[in-house]
């Protein structure tokens, strides 16, 4: 009897149009990816708090019916609304309810940072200032103080998903003058940052981490631990 493919449960904001395609493109052929959505239109602290309180418990119950082996909570900024214990609490709630391993994007990013140990990290996001500061604060709590943290100031999540990879590259270029980072973190699961990795890595020659790449990286190790990861992901996280 052939082994059953890994079953991945993905929980994303309802207006997220990027993370699900990224997962299907990178690991959908070697795993079953099932998605449930939590209502969110504007990416603000108040809206994300409501999303976690009102929507997440029901979404966790729905994803449980797919019998997942692992569940990914796919919202970086919602995980960074408080201290790291807040993000860990989201993971524990999912694990307790579903009975499966839970991965938050924020913890996936921190795991990648721990493997790289950068000294001069720049954090760039599509978010408004409050949520960008939350991401930088979470990284700082884990020992990775950002030398730069800047966002595009976009509130509507649907609009974040419409930012092109070329526009992401352009935004990054506009923010890095004079700071010389050794690592770049592009935060947001609804930003087409994975597609911007090749151009940015070729231009900057530094380690580049994105929210979706970090989550895919961890799940890929479970799906095919002995296989090489997608070329773009590997290239993005290697030193020149």
Image: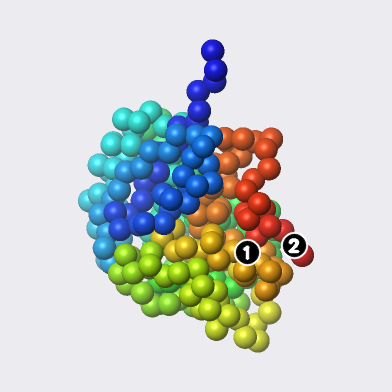
The front one of 176 and 5 is 5
Q: Residue at (57%, 44%) from the top-left corner?
A: 218
Where is residue 229? Give x, y as percent: 64, 45
Q: Residue at (55%, 17%) from the top-left corner?
A: 2
Regarding residue 144, the answer to whether it shows in the image is: no
Q: Secondary structure at mark 2?
A: loop
Question: Which residue is denoted by mark 1 in the rendering?
Answer: 198
**Closer to the eye: label 2 or 1:** 1
Relative to 216, 128 lies left or right: left
Regarding residue 224, the answer to whether it shows in the image is: yes
Where is residue 235? Give x, y as percent: 68, 57
Task: Specify few, some or many for label 1: CA neighbours under 10 Å numbering under 14, 14-19, or 20 or more.
Answer: some
Where is residue 228? Give x, y as percent: 68, 43
Question: Which residue is denoted by mark 2 in the rendering?
Answer: 239
Where is residue 63? Give x, y as percent: 33, 37
Q: Residue at (36%, 42%) from the top-left corner?
A: 35
Q: CA distance from mark 2 to mark 1?
A: 13 Å
Mark 1 and mark 2 in contact (Cβ < 8 Å)? no
């Amino acid at each position: 009897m052939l082994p059953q493919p890994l079953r991945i449960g993905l929980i994303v904001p309802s207006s997220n149009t990027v993370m699900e395609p990224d997962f299907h493109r990178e690991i959908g052929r070697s795993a079953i990816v099932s998605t449930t959505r939590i209502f969110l239109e504007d990416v603000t602290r108040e809206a994300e708090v409501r999303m976690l309180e009102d929507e997440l418990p029901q979404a966790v119950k729905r994803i449980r019916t797919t019998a997942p082996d692992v569940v990914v909570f796919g919202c970086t900024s919602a995980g960074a609304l408080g201290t790291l214990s807040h993000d860990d609490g989201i993971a524990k709630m999912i694990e307790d309810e579903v009975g499966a391993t839970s991965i938050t994007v924020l913890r996936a990013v921190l795991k990648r940072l721990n493997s790289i140990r950068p000294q001069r990290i720049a954090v760039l996001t599509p978010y408004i200032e409050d949520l960008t500061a939350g991401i930088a604060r979470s990284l700082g709590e884990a020992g990775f103080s950002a030398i730069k943290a800047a966002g595009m100031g976009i509130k509507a999540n649907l609009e974040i998903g419409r930012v092109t990879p070329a526009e992401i590259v352009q935004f990054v270029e506009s923010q890095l003058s004079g700071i010389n980072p050794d690592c770049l973190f592009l935060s947001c699961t609804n930003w087409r940052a994975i597609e911007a990795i090749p151009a940015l890595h070729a231009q900057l020659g530094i380690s580049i981490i994105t929210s979706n790449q970090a989550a895919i990286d961890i799940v890929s190790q479970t799906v095919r631990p002995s296989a090489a990861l997608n070329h773009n992901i590997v290239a993005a996280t290697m030193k020149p």
